[in-house]
Structures are given as structure tokens and as C-alpha cells.
Amino acid sequence: MSRVVNCSEHGAVAVITIDSPPVNGLGHAVRKGLVKCLSDALDNNMVEAIVVHGADKMFSAGADIKEFGSELAFTPPLLTEVINMIEASGKPVVAAIHGVAAGGGLELALGCHYRLAANNARLGLPEVTLGIIPGAGGTQRLPRLVGVPAALDLIVQGKLNPALEAHNIGLVDELFEGNAADAGIAYANKLIVDAAGPRPTRNQNAHIEAARGKPEIFEEYRLGAQKKARGMHAPLAAIESIENAVNLPFDESIEKEREIFDRCVESDQSKAMRHAFFAERTVSKIPDVPKETPPRKVDSVAVIGCGTMGQGISMAFANASIPVKVLEADQEALDAGLAKIEKTYNSSVEKGRISTEERDHVISMITGTLEYADLADADLVVEAVFEELELKKAIFSKLDQVCNPGAILATNTSTLDINEVAATTSRPGDVIGLHFFSPAHIMRLLEIVRGEKTGADVIATAMALAKMLRKTGVLVGVCEGFVGNRMLLAYLREAYFLLEEGALPQQVDKAIYDFGFPMGPFTMLDMAGLTVGYLIRQHQAGTRATDERYSDIEDRIVEMGRLGQKTGAGWYKYEAGTRKPAADDMIEEMIVETSANLSIKRREISNQEIIERCLYPLINEGAKILEEGIAIRSSDIDVVWLYGYGFPRHHGGPMFWADLIGTDTIHSKMVEFETEHGNLMKPAGLLEELAKQGKGFGDI
Ligand code: 3H9
């Protein structure tokens, strides 16, 4: 008996239970426990069949990811050895899966002779999402059970699939309802009665032979993966390993699988993706808000303003089946906003994303009003009006008068001081920032901005709410632009300066796209629209030092009426009805002329310089944010950038990427930039300190 793996007998059936919370990960102790229980069952003459299942919520989430890179990962018994032992068992072994069987968990089940799954279970090999490949036989056994094309789909996409689909493709023998151990015992007894013996997956070669001599299957898949998973190694490594399964004997191919796995697990990409996995789970842990803090109820919501943000926010709540009342200043604006919401949902129906019933349901969740008095019962109010402090203050003092005690009053401001807004109410503890990103019903990031007086239960509610909306909530403090947009400004600033120095928008965009972002800064600006940035810059004009370097190219583009994609022109031009940016001679001439007017001699700018000039100052700003305590930890900043700005996951987020490069390298480059380009590039104190100590942001 081991604490993490237990064995019990039920007549002629031995039941092995993996009991290692929270996810029955297959760490060293579990692997040892499995070998012990399996040996006992094999040695016991009374046992004729064996069932393996998981205690509590699931079968197993796979290898213990925290062990990767440590001695324990290489300490026998390795997972492959455990699985080989199961497969070689002379007594039939049944995997009874409930909850989740992921990664090594599913590989364990693939080594069993029979597989059952609860109707609501999910099964998959998500290793590529961690920058690795299944390394315990998954790329060898799965194609033997489901065929090569289905195995390629499952492994390269890395999704968890519903049990029914797994059953349909032959991964699972039978589905069950109810308790996994009971279902396993019943099935094992049937095997005993039928004298059905072991059925090693490694010997099932029909699917493998069917794919042999057809390299085009892999070629096609490789091309697709290269396009989709730009720059990511793991999907291609997985395809290589499945192709080996088809062309090489099992023992040789599984050895190669392990070599490929080891290569991947040691790569920076895998380190980055594992970092992202843990970062997005750590982000909900707030040191001074214990997880037991009871959240307030949010059964009904009000949104103030039915412009673009108000519409998106209303839809985000409606999609989570939370009724929303949206308030506008006049009937015309309200009607226009509600009509736009309806149009958006209709277009989702046309694209087959939702059914007409779902559309009717979500539309029924949203009602309009012109009266503040109608908001009295809302548990949460989200203000989403124009970025104008005085307007917001007036709204909050009205809300203070009409809303029930205990209602949470939130602002969607992306720049303004929440403390000033809160101070206009008699209940600043109930005021919080909920900074949605546009389009608010789609973007996963929610910056939750804590004011000086925001209550712990209000924060707990906002974090829980993010989950209800299927978003990732990141708690941040008050400063201009909070975490995401403050760092974005440093990135954009340098992108503009690079144009003045010799680059063109398409060159900057390509370098950033090739780094792994979904798009470069200028394509992004055109997509988002140039107006908001323009207004913010106008607003800041008075506070900018007279000798501070400032690029006004975008301001002039806006003043020409080129507001981005929506007007058919911005940094690029767009043919009617397309969203494809095309370089515009007029903009290029304007850029070259600007350089001449500034007496800047245009020069060749390398892609490497573009990456360093745009991303190092962004990291430097992240360092200041950490220094000021605006973000709790550097991995939270990474989550903001992964979810809000499409920072490539295989680089882990800006702060993790900085650690990979080395804070000393970033610091010395910033010193060089400061000398060449001035004070805006001054390295943050924290960056300097870390560089001196040979430490990274992750060491804080
Ligand atoms: C693998 O198997 C390699 C093999 O092919 C080869 C080996 C040689 N390890 O997500 P949750 C933690 S690679 C360690 O919030 P949910 C997680 O950090 C693995 N820890 O729960 C969290 O900790 P905390 C392939 C893990 O119910 C807690 O468990 N497998 C692991 O929302 C709860 O997690 C995968 O990629 C792990 N494997 O979702 C599956 N998994 O409470 C990874 C979770 O301290 N896991 N933790 O923050 C998942 O996708 C989800 O956890 C799952 C449950 C869907 C299972």
C-alpha cells in the first residue's frame, strides 16, 4: 500500500486507485506505487483481472509537469517502464476513466488492454501545448488504436476530446455512467467470464500498415502545422514521431520518441510554455485575499453606455447567461447599440458559431433602459462610457445614490485614476476597475484594477466573475494605462521612432509577426482604430516635457481622416470589403519626408534591431511596473501579454522571455539605447539590480 496509489481486491479483480491530489499527476511516488500495486496483483493467484482508475475528480492529468527538469523526472521507474509493465501483464488490465485522462494519464490508459470512459470524461494528449510531445508511448500506441490521421489530429491539436468522440474513433471500448471503479470491476468480471485475455496495443498493427508508404499524409499535415503553429517546434516533432511509428519497429520507434521528448523538454520553447501553464494558474492567487474570501453574488448586471465597449461587455455577460440592463443617454443611441448587438449575434449564427436558439437566449438576456433608477437592483454595474474623468465622476455619484448597498460599482476605464472615481461615492470599498479588452465578448483578458480602498470581497468577486465569463482575470494596481497599455505605449513609441530612423510599417510588422505575434503594431493599430490613441496623446500633450522625443506621424495620419481599417485607410490602405493591409506610397513618402524634416539620415534597420527596440523597452516598463507594485508578480505581466496582446506563448510572455535572454543582456542594451536615443530608454532600477545580481524576474 502506498499513500498515493492504493490497491484493493474485489473477488477476482484487483483495483488499483491513483490517489494523488489535485490531478493524480504521475510523479515519481505515483509511478513507484503503480509498480508496487501491479506487482502485488500479478503475484496474487486469486487475481484474474486488474482495473486502474483515479480517485476524486479524474483519472489522471498526466506526468507531473513540476518534475520536468529535475532529477525525479529521470528516477526509475519511468512512466514508460510502468506502461510497458502494464502492457506485458498476463492478466487483462482495464483503464476506467472518469473526469480527465490527459497526456501521460491517457498514455497509461493506452498501455492498458481495455479502456472504459465515463460519458462526461475528456481524453487527450495536450503535450504540444507544453512544447513537448507525448513521451510515454502516446505517439506509438494512439495511431495503432485510432489510425494515423485521427492520431495526428489528436496529438498535433492537443485538445481534450469528449468521451463520445473517443469512443467513435476506437480509443475507448465502452462508455459508462456512474462510478469508475464499479464500471471497471463489472467490465473486468465480464472479461474473466469470456476468458478474454490481454490485448497489448503495441501488437495492433493494422492501422500502422495502412499508412505505411504514404508519406504524403505527413507532408500535408506538416505544411498545415507549419502554417498554424508558426515557429513552434512541438507539433512538427510530434508528426516526426508518429511517422516513425509507421516506418520503424515498435521498440526502435518508442526509443526515438523518448529522444524527441527529451530534446523538446529541454528546449526554451517548452520551458516558456510550461511557464505559461503555471502562470495562468498562479494569477488567481492574491496574497492578501485568501481563497476562502466569500465573493458577493452577481446575479444581475448593469452596463452604462452602449457604444463599442458597452456592447461587447453586455454580450460577455449575456454569453454567461447573466442578465444585463444596458443604460444609454438617449433612445437613439440605445436603439443603435442594441441593434448592433443583435447584428453581431446574427452574424455568429450565419457563421455557424451559435444556433438560432442560443442567439435568442443571449439576446433575451440584454435589455435597455434610459433611467438610472432601473439600475437599483443590479449586483454589479460596469460603466463603459467615454474616457472623460469628469463624466465618469458624475456617473459614479449618481450610481452611489441609486444602487443597492453591496452593489459593486466598476469602471471600464483604461487610463483614468480609479481612486478619484471611487472618491465621488460614499462607498469606495465597492469600487473597482474592470478593464475589458476590445472586442470585450471575445478577448480573454480582464485587467481587474484595485483601488486604494477596494474591499477584499470585491476583488474576490471580480476574480470569480472573470472565470464565469471564461476570461483570465489579472489583478493590477492603479497607474496610467495599468499593466497592458502602459507597456504597449513603450512598444508603440519605439515602433514609431523606428519609422523616423529608416524602417517602414510593413518591415516592422513583419519582424514582429515573425517573432510570433499574430500581427505587428501598425496592422494592430489599424485594426483597433487610430482615434482612441490620438485622443489620449492629445490629452497627454500638456504633460509631455518639451525636450521629450515624440513622433507625430500617426497624429497626422488621423488628421487626414485615415482612422484605420474602418475607414479603409490608416497606416495601410484597404481595398473595399477587405481587411488585408496594403502598403501605401503616400504613407511611405510621408515617413521619408518626416525623417528629412527631422534631419535624421535614414539607415538600414535589421529585424533583430526591430525586436530589441520594440520589446526591450516594453520589458523595461514591465520592470518599473513590478518595482512600483502595480503587478503582483512578473508572471502576471506575462499573462496580461499572452491573453491581451497575443505575445507568442512559446516565448512565455515578455518577462519570462527577458529571463531567457538574460536581464544583464537586456540591461546593457537599454544602457546603449539610452545613450543613443535619450532618457525614455533609461533602464529601470529593478532591471539594473537584477542584472547586477545575475538574477531574472522569475527569481523575485
Ligand atoms: C505529460 O504527460 C508528458 C508525458 O507524455 C510523458 C512523460 C514522460 N502536473 O488546471 P487546474 C496542477 S505532460 C503538475 O486548475 P482544472 C495545476 O497547476 C502533461 N501539476 O484544474 C493546479 O495547481 P494549483 C500533460 C498539474 O480542474 C492544480 O493542478 N498533461 C498538472 O481546471 C489544478 O489544476 C496536461 O497537459 C500536471 N500535469 O483542470 C494536462 N495538471 O492548484 C494539464 C494540473 O497549485 N492539466 N496541475 O494552481 C490540465 O489541463 C488541467 O489541470 C486539467 C484540470 C484539465 C487536468
Image (spheres, helix red, strand yellow):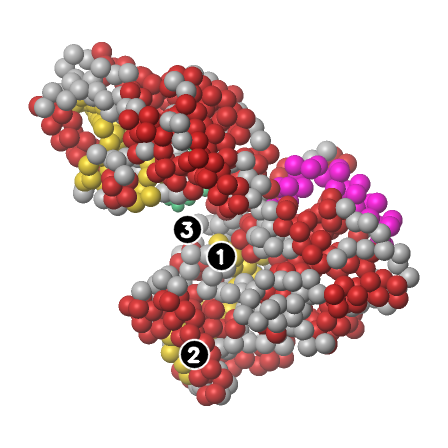
In this picture, is 457 found above or below 699?
below
Q: Which of 503 and 284 is in front in this view?
A: 503
Q: Circle 1 sits on which residue?
A: 444
Amino acid type of the residue that numbered disc 1 sits on in the rendered structure: Arg
Q: What stretch is highlighted in magenta?
A: 653-680
Q: Circle 2 sits on which residue?
A: 338
User: Which element type, helix, strand or loop, lies under badge 1?
Assistant: loop
Amino acid type of the residue that numbered disc 3 sits on in the rendered structure: Glu
Label pair 1/2, CB-CB below 8 angstroms? no
The quadrant of the rendering that contains the N terminus is top left
Sequence-wise, the earlier of marks 1 and 3 is 3
Q: Does the residue labelled 1 lie within 8 Å of ligand 1?
A: no
Residue at the outermost right position:
599
Q: Main secondary structure of the magenta part?
A: helix
> Horizontally, is 246 left or right of 222 in the view?
left
Sequence-wise, the earlier of marks 2 and 3 is 3
Spatial CA span between label 1 and label 3? 25 Å
Q: How many other residues sit within 10 Å of disc 3, few (<14), some (14-19) or many (≥20)?
A: few
Residue at horizontal 49 percent and vertical 73 percent from the top: 310
Amino acid type of the residue that numbered disc 2 sits on in the rendered structure: Leu
* Residue 184 on image: x %, y %: 19, 31
